[in-house]
């Protein structure tokens, strides 16, 4: 199993994440598997609003333990 | 080799005497550099009750501990002094290229006292510091003066400099200090202090070295952060016009959850702060109609004129401040708008666009470009100036000011031509402009007739363009920071981006379950967050770091590791936060010594939701600001009823022994 840190921004089912904002997935899971698992709308990820470890990666990219998946976080109030 | 230089320069403008002083290591270990070093010297050198525009006030230019050490996004400098607008501690922060120049000239800080008989400027090169006659540059605007001084001194060397324009020379209490041809240390009215001293400029051409203790470690942190900044990008299809929709989605999902601050960086890379022009309206972050309106008064068709994509169409060049890898600055061509009077202006910041846009219901972006340039040249703070224009319009609309008072100007909401003309008159102190040139509090005192109800301020300082009725922690900082009305100290949202709780033992953790937390209650959790914001901001301002780097997350931009690597210290984040608490407490002690009652710094009732707005996204929102101020003071170790630092806190922080006044 692999543990992925997720910053879903305004999207997806946050209740699936633990207190530290992580989710456990089976080995060999891909970015696409993760996005589906947390219920990110297809339109959001098709628009490329996410980064894996701060890089743009395709949906079939395999995840590794400790990866960070983040969604765009504009700073209202800056 | 500890990142800092270990020396400061003192210039007495009354006598012309110049001398330098070694700074003991323990001062840096307890106050860092930057604002902490400034607070240490100003507390010791400004006598109680000094006239802010008199001989006894001390004006300092301080660099940051991390500036020039191989760290990135650490090129901020600060002006420090007693503020003529609040009567208390004043400081103002700016980027550009001045911060490293202070250190390369051989000092961590340069302090001026006294008043020169005639206009002068300080020049420093390898031959040391000297005061030179400023007769030629006095009377010129900040940009013209800088160009002239570059011609005089910059032919065979790169000089960085700070200058004042007409607003500083005229001692407008909302005058700032310019560097890099119009970037502004705008807050606290310190441009007026510079003008009162007849100091036109500080021109720095030194070429000394700045060293760090562990260069390899500095490079490692820098490389890791720079790679992330380089790689993280926005999707190409995201347009400025889509930002309001994104704002609505974010608000629906709940604002108060952990965010990955690094994901705010691509917005800054593409647009700079102006992405907030449209992003902040639907949520209520951007104040409208002198803080009494909403997007129902300033619809999409109005605010989309400020769409950041429109602004970057004019951006001919992007630029970075010293050591910055984000690069939010830009130069816009405005030649056609100004009929050739000005070819370029700095890309206007969000604060300027909102102060002269939504706050006044002004839909004319062209007028804002023009005002941006004349304000930058005059050295007038756009937040304060726009807020003062809003005050004047509301007075006019309610019959307190008449056409006779305004010399014929129709000061109605959204009248762009009148807004431009009034701005020009404030700079030249002509007619009604003279009444308004010192900010809203002074203007209300001069006008009377109960106009103070429209003078939105905290302790005399006009607040930044972020609404506490959306994010109440903004309000706590507006009302409790020794430099009031400051939007860059902290907010609930900033806290979530920095992720302080990953490093600091007492900082409340924010989890994905936090979106349901009631931020409108004066809880211990809210107070601890605001205290944490204040402490880390002091550490940041002692280091020369940029707020936008800190907001990208302290796990990404590793401030604590940078400080230990630059200095060779081995302090924990908790110990750095204690330093921040010491710096903040000393600034508060400065205000108390000046006889300021901290309660009197409470922000204007209107922006606390008293009475609440009747419509719009912030409808009905109220901020229990007095209770929140008390909670903040209590968790700082200050008297929770008066805001005066407790003796035991001052003792624990060792402040008096460090000041050698025990």
Image: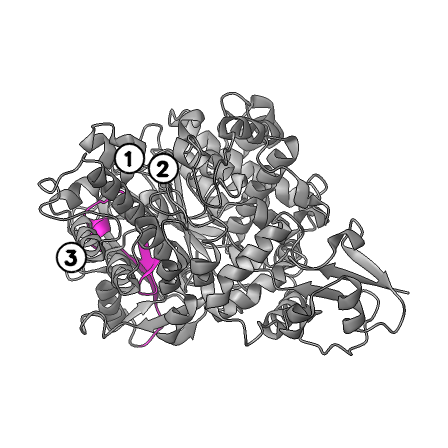
Q: Is residue B399 left or right of residue B330?
A: left
Q: Outermost residue toward the top?
A: B641
Crowding at label 3, few (<14), some or many (≥20) Cα neighbours within 10 Å?
some
Marks 2/1 in contact by CB < 8 Å: the verdict is yes
Mark 2 crowdedness (10 Å alpha carbons): few <14, some 14-19, many ≥20? many
The residue wearing badge 2 is B457
Label 1 crowd bin: few (<14), some (14–19), many (20+), radius 10 Å: many
* Of the pair B462 and B489, the residue shown nearer to us: B462
- Alpha carbon distance from label 3 to label 1: 27 Å
Residue B88 screen position, x and y as percent: 37, 34
Residue at the spot of label 3: B139
Which of marks 1 and 3 precedes in the sequence?
A: 3
Report if residue B651 lies within the magenta region. no
Q: Chain of mark 2?
A: B
Image point (18%, 53%), residue name: B418
Q: Is residue B554 visible?
A: yes
Q: Is residue B504 left or right of residue B276?
A: right
Residue B661 percent coordinates (x, y): 48, 28
User: What residue span does the magenta drawing correspond to?
Assistant: B156-184
Q: In the picture, residue A1 is in which quadrant? A: bottom right
Q: Quadrant of residue B657?
A: top right
Between label 3 and label 1, give the one nearer the viewer.
1
On whether disc 2 and disc 1 are found on a single subunit, the reply is yes
Q: Is residue A35 above or below residue B592?
A: below
């Amino acid at each position: 199993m692999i543990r992925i840190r997720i910053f879903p921004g305004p999207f997806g089912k946050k209740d699936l994440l633990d207190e530290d904002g992580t989710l456990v997935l089976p080995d060999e899971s891909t970015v696409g598997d993760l996005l589906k698992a947390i219920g990110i709308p297809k339109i959001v990820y098709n628009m490329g609003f996410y980064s894996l470890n701060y890089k743009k990666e395709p949906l079939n990219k395999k995840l590794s333990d400790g990866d960070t998946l983040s969604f765009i976080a504009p700073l209202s109030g800056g | 080799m500890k990142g800092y230089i270990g020396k400061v320069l003192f210039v007495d403008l009354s006598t012309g005497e110049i001398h330098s002083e070694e700074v003991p290591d323990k001062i840096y270990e307890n106050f860092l550099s930057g604002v902490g070093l400034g607070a240490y010297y100003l507390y010791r050198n400004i006598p109680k009750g000094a006239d802010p525009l008199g001989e006894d006030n001390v004006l300092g230019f301080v660099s940051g501990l991390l500036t020039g050490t191989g760290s990135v996004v650490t090129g901020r400098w600060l002006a420090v002094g007693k503020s003529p607008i609040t009567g208390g501690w004043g400081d103002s922060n700016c980027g550009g290229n001045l911060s490293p120049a202070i250190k390369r000239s051989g000092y961590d800080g340069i302090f001026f006292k006294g008043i020169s008989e005639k206009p002068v400027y300080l020049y420093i090169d390898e031959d040391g510091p000297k005061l030179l006659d400023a007769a030629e540059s006095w009377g010129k605007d900040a940009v013209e003066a800088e160009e002239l001084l570059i011609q005089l001194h910059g032919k065979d060397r790169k000089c960085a400099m700070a200058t004042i324009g007409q607003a500083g020379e005229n001692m407008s209490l909302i005058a700032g200090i310019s560097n890099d041809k119009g970037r502004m240390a705008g807050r606290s009215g310190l441009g007026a202090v510079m003008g009162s001293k007849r100091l036109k400029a500080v021109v720095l051409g030194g070429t000394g070295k700045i060293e760090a203790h562990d260069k390899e470690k500095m490079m490692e942190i820098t490389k890791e952060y720079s790679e992330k900044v380089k790689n993280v990008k926005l999707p190409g299809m995201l347009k400025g016009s889509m930002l309001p929709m994104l704002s609505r989605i974010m608000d629906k999902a709940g604002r108060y959850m952990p965010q990955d601050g690094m994901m705010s960086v691509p917005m800054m890379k593409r647009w700079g702060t102006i992405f907030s022009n449209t992003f902040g309206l639907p949520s209520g972050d951007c104040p409208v109609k002198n803080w009494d309106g909403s997007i129902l008064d300033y619809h999409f068709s109005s605010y989309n004129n400020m769409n950041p994509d429109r602004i970057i169409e004019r951006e001919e060049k992007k630029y970075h401040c010293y050591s910055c890898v984000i690069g939010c600055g830009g130069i816009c061509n405005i030649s056609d708008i100004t009929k050739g009077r000005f070819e370029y202006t700095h890309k206007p910041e969000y604060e300027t666009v909102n102060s002269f846009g939504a706050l006044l219901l002004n839909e004319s972006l062209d007028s804002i470009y023009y005002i941006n340039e004349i304000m930058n040249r005059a050295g007038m703070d756009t937040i304060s100036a726009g807020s003062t224009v809003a005050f004047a319009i509301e007075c006019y609309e309610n019959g307190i000011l008449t056409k006779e008072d305004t010399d014929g100007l129709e000061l109605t909401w959204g009248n762009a031509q009148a807004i431009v003309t009034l701005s020009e008159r404030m700079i030249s102190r002509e007619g009604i402009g003279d009444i308004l040139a010192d900010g809203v509090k002074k203007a209300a005192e001069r006008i009377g007739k109960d106009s103070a109800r429209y003078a939105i301020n905290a302790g005399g300082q006009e607040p930044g363009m972020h609404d506490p009725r959306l994010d109440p922690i903004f309000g706590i900082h507006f009302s409790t920071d020794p430099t009031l009305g400051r939007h860059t100290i902290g907010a609930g949202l900033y806290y979530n981006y920095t992720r302080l709780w990953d490093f600091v033992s007492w900082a409340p953790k924010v989890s994905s379950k936090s979106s349901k937390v009631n931020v409108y209650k004066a809880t211990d959790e809210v107070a601890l967050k605001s205290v944490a914001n204040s402490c880390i901001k002091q550490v940041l301002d002692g280091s020369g770091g940029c707020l936008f780097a800190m907001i990208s997350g302290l796990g990404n931009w590793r401030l604590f590791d940078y400080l230990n690597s630059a200095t060779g210290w081995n302090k924990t984040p908790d110990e750095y936060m204690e330093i921040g608490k010491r710096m903040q407490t000393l600034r508060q002690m400065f205000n108390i010594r000046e006889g300021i009652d901290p309660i009197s710094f409470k922000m204007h009732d209107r922006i606390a939701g008293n009475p609440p707005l009747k419509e719009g996204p912030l409808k009905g929102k109220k901020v229990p600001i007095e209770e929140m101020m008390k909670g903040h003071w209590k968790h700082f170790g200050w008297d929770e009823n008066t805001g005066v630092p407790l003796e035991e806190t001052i003792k624990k922080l060792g402040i008096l022994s460090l000041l050698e006044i025990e």
